[in-house]
Image (cartoon, rainbow, N blue to C red):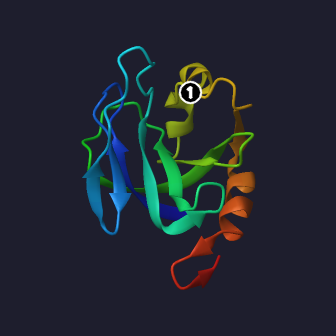
Amino acid sequence: MKLRMVVEWTIGTRERYDWKEGALVPRQPWPEAWELPPVNYGCIPGYFNPADRAELDAIWCDPAPVAMGEWLEGEVLGMVWVGDCDHKILLGRPGDLEKLDRVGLEAWFVGREARIAPAEEALEFIAGLWRDGGRG
């Protein structure tokens, strides 16, 4: 399954945005004392996660920096499963999952029981989500 995400936060930067009503809106910069994101982070508009009632979070698996506001389309490669159910979908091209900084990613989600789940588990999670216009 291919999905499109918009980048809200570029790998290694403090500047970040939120996707709200079809546009990127500046957000409070990430505190200097906190770890910078080890991935390009964003969301998949049109899919809503009941854990935070916001668009479904997504991570682009290729470690090359991607500009905020950039749209990317990729295969569902897996999911960062977290204990509070605010799971993050891993997107990319075939082979990109091997490029993912798994150690850095799991450390970034420390205290949230993070684990990398396979694509099948991610697809099952996506199928149960609310979408624009109705349920999965």
The answer to whether residue 129 is above or below residue 94 is below
Image quadrant in which the C terminus is located: bottom right
x and y percentages locating residue 42 in the rendered image: 42, 48
The answer to whether residue 132 is above or below residue 53 is below
Snapshot quadrant of residue 118: top right
x and y percentages locating residue 64 in the rendered image: 33, 32
Snapshot quadrant of residue 47: bottom right
The residue shown at (32%, 37%) is 28
The answer to whether residue 107 is above or below residue 122 is above
123 or 14: nearer the viewer: 14
x and y percentages locating residue 22 in the rendered image: 31, 68
The residue shown at (48%, 38%) is 61
x and y percentages locating residue 46 in the rendered image: 48, 71
The residue shown at (66%, 55%) is 51
Q: Residue furthest top?
A: 33
Left or right: 22, with 1 as reference point: left
Image quadrant in which the N terminus is located: bottom right
The residue shown at (64%, 48%) is 86
The amino acid pointed to by label 1 is Leu
Residue identifier under label 1: 105
SS class, disc 1: helix
Left or right: 27, with 97 as reference point: left
The answer to whether residue 50 is above or below residue 37 is below
